[in-house]
Image (spheres, rainbow, N blue to C red):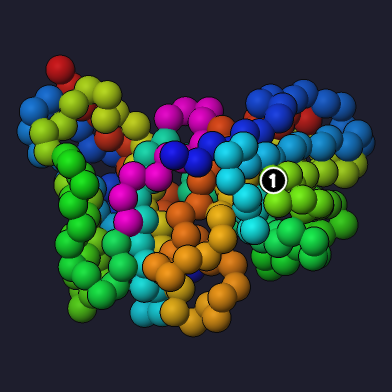
Amino acid sequence: GAVVSQHPSWVICKSGTSVKIECRSLDFQATTMFWYRQFPKQSLMLMATSNEGSKATYEQGVEKDKFLINHASLTLSTLTVTSAHPEDSSFYICSASGLRGLSPGDTQYFGPGTRLTVL
Amino acid sequence: DQQVKQNSPSLSVQEGRISILNCDYTNSMFDYFLWYKKYPAEGPTFLISISSIKDKNEDGRFTVFLNKSAKHLSLHIVPSQPGDSAVYFCAASAVAGNQGGSEKLVFGKGTKLTVNP
């Protein structure tokens, strides 16, 4: 099946610093990548959707100036958490979806996630 | 307002028996449903999906049933194995009205399945 990687798998940073998380589709071209965050015992909450070469679409309540998303190529998207604070500590997961075919609902393939801890 | 609900936070079954995980949704625009399996500190893994034009989809030990009138779907795992122990997420998407754009998934909170040897 399709493989999506994330880097780093975990990161600890000081409050006020910025952290960049990479999401790569390793064996397919991802026209769309999604960024989620998950709090303990909660569902995955979609933060934003990014299409290659265009600006990301953010969900309501997600600060686009704080969570910068870049989808520079069909295999790479990055999420930068700017001026991170302790409340940004969470599990961030990306997913990638390939070119749409004739059948509905291209399956999203998820990365392994990145655990961010802001001190 | 939760559009996808998994009302059972946990389920425990014996090895070899059937596991039934339930999911309800409220948005009638949803027409594509997926089940994901997730281990701690890992991303979800796709298991099985179903389109609203069907009421059943089977893949090996996994079967998903969809009852559109009740806005309810369920995942059956039979026979259950200890390796099936994980958190299972139900997700829904509105594909038909998407007009070729990205397909957002709305997730439930998950059900933690424990299969006892």
Q: Is residue A95 visible?
A: yes
Crowd class of label 1 (few under 14; some 14 to 19; many from 20; radius 10 Å): many
Taking the magenta stretch, the answer to whether it contains residue B99 is no
Disc 1: which residue:
A75
Chain on which label 1 sits = A
Quadrant that contains the C terminus of chain B: top left
How far from the left and from the top, in percent, is residue B39?
43, 30
Residue drawn at (8%, 28%) of the image: B16
How far from the left and from the top, in percent, is residue A116?
71, 31
Compared with B72, B57 (above or below) is above
How far from the left and from the top, in percent, is residue B17?
8, 33
Magenta segment, which residues? Answer: B39-49
For label 1, the SS is: loop
Residue drawn at (11%, 33%) of the image: B79
Q: In this view, does B88 lie to the left or right of A77?
A: left
Residue drawn at (46%, 55%) of the image: A107
